[in-house]
Image: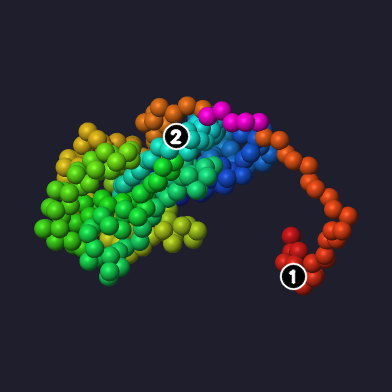
Amino acid sequence: MSLDDAEIIQRIHNDLIDSYDEELELELEDRAYENIPGMEFLDGADEHSNSEDLNNESNTNKAENQKEYRRTYFRELFRLQAELVKLQDWVAATGHKVVIIFEGRDAAGKGGVIKRITQRLNPRICRVAALPAPNERERTQWYFQRYVSHLPAAGEMVLFDRSWYNRAGVERVMGFCDDEQYEEFFRSVPDFERMLVRSGIQVIKYWFSISDEEQHLRFLGRIHDPLKQWKLSPMDLESRRRWEQYTKAKEVMLERTHITEAPWWVIEAVDKKKARLNCIHHLLNQMTYEEIKKPLIELPQREHHDDYVRQPVPKDLFVPDIY
């Protein structure tokens, strides 16, 4: 097996471990990574599968470093998510309005960080807008019209998983807009975003940056993982072929839409976990939030009435008890 093949297999393996970590993130409640039963399996999974290397000192050190790296990741993630809850409460209490835009190449990790931001938040306060391709009617509307209906009201945060910047990226590269529409977008978008800011909506824009090699490996991981193959569309595969065109489009977009009122922030996203932590940390620092004191919650006693009789549920309504 060539070195390149070995690296590819190791990368697919690492993506699988990242999926395990994602499930742990969803399940953990005690926030004590070191005390999780069964973590020995996941920690050991970071070691190379070649039995000849298991006793190798450098390989052991690498495995230990991986364990500590992931422990640190979990500790910081849970700490930052606790701060996000405080931010959410502050947004709701003050009526603040926030739009957070996530842009980047396919497989850059936008969805992963959005998932970690929203994971423990109230979807009525923090919601995600991930619009599909425009339909026939929407293509005849003012370009920004279909995005406006998703903008936040007072006390809301809206995370755009891709946004109106589709025109500067995929639409430009794939030929879905003409030169006149493209130039009109750049004339309009600074005024549009300044108008949002003047109306009291804070606009935060993130670009997730990955290398050519990293996208190649992530696409291979999706191809070989049946649980992720749905993430690969024909458009994604075509975007891979047109890497350089997307690079040029990105450079133009950042240059022409980086404004004081709504600047771009670039996230180095080759390392998924670091990118998530760095993005959340930066986001928290974009607002001067403070912890909102809440009254002590007391659970009321349940009322009991002598004339109430609970009716039995018919057995055929129950889901079969397979597990």
Residue at 43 percent of width and 38 percent of height: 95
- Where disc 2 sits, the SS reads helix
Tell me: residue 248, above or below residue 233: above
Distance, label 2 to label 1, CA atoms, is 46 Å
Q: Amino acid at mark 1?
A: Leu
Q: From the viewer's perspective, is 205 left or right of 177? A: right
Q: Nearer the viewer, residue 293 or 171?
A: 293
Percent of width and height locating residue 302: 79, 46
| Disc 1 target residue | 317
Q: Mark 2, residues whose alpha carbon is within 10 Å: few (<14), some, or many (≥20)?
A: few
Q: Nearer the viewer, residue 276 or 160?
A: 160
Earlier along the polypeptide chain: callout 2 or callout 1? 2
Q: Quadrant of the C terminus?
A: bottom right
Residue 151: percent from the left, percent from the top? 35, 49
Residue 211 placement: quadrant = top left
Q: Is residue 313 visible?
A: yes
* Residue 31 occupies quadrant: top right
Q: Amino acid at mark 2?
A: Thr
Q: Main secondary structure of the magenta part?
A: loop
Q: Is residue 213 visible?
A: no
Residue furthest to the left in view is 180
Residue located beneath label 2 in the image: 94
Give the magenta-colored segment's residue range. 292-296
